[in-house]
Image (cartoon, helix red, strand yellow):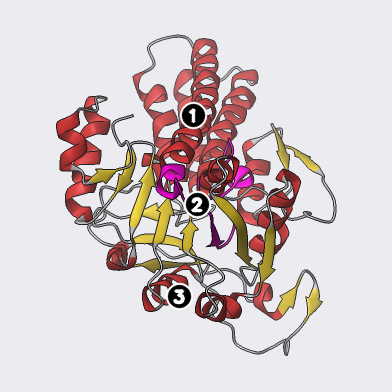
Amino acid sequence: MVLLDQTALPDKVTHIVCSDEDRVAEAIRRLEVRGAPAIGAAAAFGLVLAARRLRALEPSEALFRAELLKAKQKLAQTRPTAVNLFWALERMWQLVESAQSPLASLVASLEAEALAIMAEDRALNKAISRQGAKLFAGQRIAVLTHCNAGALATCGQGTALGVIRDAFANGNIAAVYADETRPLLQGARLTAWELQLDGIPITLITDNMAAWVMKEKRVQAVIVGADRIAANGDTANKIGTYGLAVLAKAHGLPFYIAAPSTTFDFTLASGELIPIEERAPEEVRQVRGTVTAPKDVPVFNPAFDVTPAGLITGIITEFGVLQAPYDTAIETLQKQLKTGRKTNEDVDKCNCQSGAGA
């Protein structure tokens, strides 16, 4: 599997060749691949690489399954917050548990499933983008975004940036403001790079400029991605998102989350139960290898924060835009996913707008 090394952007475009699950796990842990949907897809292909490696050793079926389980667990331990990682691995593992065929056929089935996960995410990106772009029809506004929820974070054109791309193509987005997203600068290094490539007007600001940008009425909406959404609508996203939501509320601006149904964790009642990853202190003490703080200063470095549902104007999904009360909307979304059907009655019950039955 070949991955674009996101840690090298925007200075250079380099690729990483992964031949086994260890290298995939390392890439996820190092943020060489990042973004909840992209992490999920990468982990799925990591399991395929493990299956291929094990199959070549011609093990017994029992040993193959035992070693493959270890590979799955290794991949699952890379990052704790993004639910797509665990969703993708569990989906792959269901094939292993239900397989009745020879190991060679199982390996082929796993590869087909990983390819399906990638293709489905691309389709979800397109659907989310269409649904979200409808929110801005008839307008011409500037929006603020945080971190990177674009092509680099997914298998397609992105979630939040996908909405921005479609709305820009429709003539409804005049400009985008992007937070740097400290400490790892995903907004500066990745979002600014992506949008410049697309020719979308992008202005970069530091995170602590967002309040003044809103006060000066330079933006009329905020749209971000998500790493995990609880059953009540509380949403985990890159650290700094919660602060933006508070600021948007104070300035009367709509605050939107864009995420596929695969990012919802129906097992968690609220955001208080979402595990928050804490990363190495060096990420704060240094900026891309340059020391910017005393080498022994204590550091608190949570990678994510949780935005309460009450601060969210709408959650843009492939089904439409979910609105409060989110517990009801998300419960209906879960039912839709189980049945595989979307009816007008379902749309009404899930408090969706903007063509949610499409």
Of tags 2 and 3, the one toward the viewer is 3
Are the residues tagged 1 and 3 within 8 Å (C-beta)?
no
- What amino acid type is highlighted by mark number 2? Gln
Residue at the extreme right: 12
Which residue does the image show at 65% across and 49% down from the upper left? 26
Up the image or down, 118 lies above or below 206; here it is: above
x, y (%) of residue 49?
Answer: 62, 29
First-in-chain label (2 vs 1): 2
Are the residues tagged 2 and 3 within 8 Å (C-beta)?
no
Q: Mark 2: which secondary structure?
A: loop
Of tags 2 and 1, the one toward the viewer is 1
x, y (%) of residue 152?
Answer: 64, 45
Please tell me in which quadrant of the rendered image residue 192 appears.
Answer: bottom right
Which residue does the image show at 71% across and 44% down from the upper left? 198
First-in-chain label (2 vs 3): 2
- In the rendered structure, which segment of residues is drawn in magenta? 132-159
Query: What residue sits right under mark 2 in the picture?
Result: 77
Q: Quadrant of the N terminus?
A: top right
State how many labels appear.
3
Give the CA separation, mark 1 to mark 3.
31 Å
Query: What residue sits right under mark 1 in the picture?
Result: 123
- What amino acid type is highlighted by mark number 1? Ala
Please tell me in which quadrant of the rendered image residue 92 appears.
Answer: top left
Which residue does the image show at 24% across and 28% down from the upper left? 342
**Dot 3 alpha-carbon crowd within 10 angstroms: few under 14, some 14 to 19, many 20 or more:** some
Query: What residue sits right under mark 3 in the picture?
Result: 243
